Image (cartoon, grey):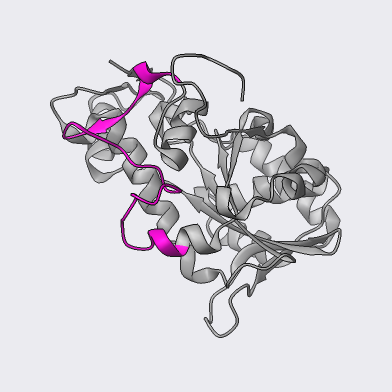
């Protein structure tokens, strides 16, 4: 059984670090609207995620535009876009919050001990409470990704659509390549880690059998998904990317300097082995 034990609590970006990132972005003179949002609501973790990601891009030599339209006529914008080697990269960020059930579990611990700055969260594949099963985390992650599709237009060779997910609250902050492989492709590299719901194997988002609302649109539009393991300045090097097999832009991802540190997760080849991704 898969079991995870988290005792770290909300440790996204240490307060002093987000201040440093704010100063870094302010010095660039390029993020007035993003910084305005931060100052208006300095504890908003979605805004923090945008700031951290902007920092990663800037630090890697990429200056993105903020809040740009990627689907003309939709009236909606994606968080970032940038030009590189004749292509426009459109990126929409999504932060996955805890489910109401998990949040209630956490809040109960905080109320019991107001001085405690951490909490315990145990997830098991066979947990009696379905909201605390590891598969429930996978399903929630898939659902949140599907919410972002209408912001993107139809793909072209020169317009690349990428969703970037903050997975701090997924699997107790211990997301790994097998979790990502199941979300995207359904089958784990190591069969022992396979996820099931009501005895049925979870389907990956890029599998034709994945039939939730928006699935066809995702497979048609989204060329890659970046899974950020945690919301802290150095975590991009611990993060993952999957590329839509039908719209393979792996080389275009590798060309962009900030993304060169990402681990590319691919379809399981031999489910009884532990070959490198």
Which residue is outermost to the bottom? Answer: 73
Residue 31 higher or lower than 54, as above or below: below
Residue 8 higher or lower than 10, as above or below: above
Q: Where residue 273 sits in the image (x, y, percent)?
A: 50, 14
From the viewer's side, name the closer residue of 3 and 44: 3
**Which residue is rendered at x = 52% and y = 46% of the image?**
165
**Which residue is rendered at x = 31% and y = 55% of the image?**
211
Left or right: residue 42 versus residue 2 is right
Q: Which residues are magenta?
A: 190-217
Residue 195 higher or lower than 32, as above or below: above
Q: Where residue 127 sits in the image (x, y, percent)?
A: 18, 24
Q: Is residue 207 magenta?
A: yes
Left or right: residue 266 versus residue 184 is right
From the viewer's side, name the closer residue of 166 and 249: 249
Picture quarter with the C terminus: top right
Q: Is residue 222 magenta?
A: no
Q: Where residue 36 sits in the image (x, y, percent)?
A: 64, 64
Q: Where residue 146 sits in the image (x, y, percent)?
A: 41, 57
Residue 44 in view in this figure: no
């Amino acid at each position: 059984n898969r079991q995870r034990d988290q005792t770290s609590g909300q440790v996204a970006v240490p307060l002093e670090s987000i201040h440093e990132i704010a100063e870094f972005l302010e010095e660039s003179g390029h993020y007035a609207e993003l910084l305005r949002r931060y100052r208006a609501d300095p504890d908003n973790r979605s805004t923090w995620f945008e700031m951290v990601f902007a920092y990663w891009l800037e630090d890697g030599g990429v200056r993105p535009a903020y809040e740009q339209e990627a689907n003309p006529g939709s009236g909606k914008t994606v968080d970032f876009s940038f030009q590189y080697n004749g292509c426009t990269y459109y990126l929409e960020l999504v932060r996955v919050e805890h489910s109401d059930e998990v949040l209630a579990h956490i809040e109960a611990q905080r109320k019991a001990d107001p001085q405690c700055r951490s909490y315990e969260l145990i997830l098991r594949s066979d947990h009696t409470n379905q909201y605390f099963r590891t598969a429930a985390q996978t399903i929630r992650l898939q659902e949140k990704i599907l919410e972002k599709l209408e912001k993107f237009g139809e793909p072209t060779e020169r317009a690349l659509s990428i969703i970037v997910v903050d997975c701090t609250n997924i699997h107790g902050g211990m997301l790994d390549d097998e979790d990502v492989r199941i979300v995207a492709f359904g089958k784990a590299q190591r069969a022992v880690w396979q996820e099931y719901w009501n005895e049925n194997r979870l389907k990956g988002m890029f599998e034709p059998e994945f039939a939730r609302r928006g699935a066809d649109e995702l497979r048609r539009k989204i060329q890659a998904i970046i899974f950020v393991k945690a919301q802290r300045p150095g975590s991009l090097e611990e993060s993952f990317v999957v590329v839509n097999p039908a719209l393979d832009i792996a080389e275009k991802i590798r060309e962009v300097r900030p993304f060169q540190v990402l681990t590319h997760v691919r379809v399981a080849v031999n489910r009884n082995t532990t070959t490198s991704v």
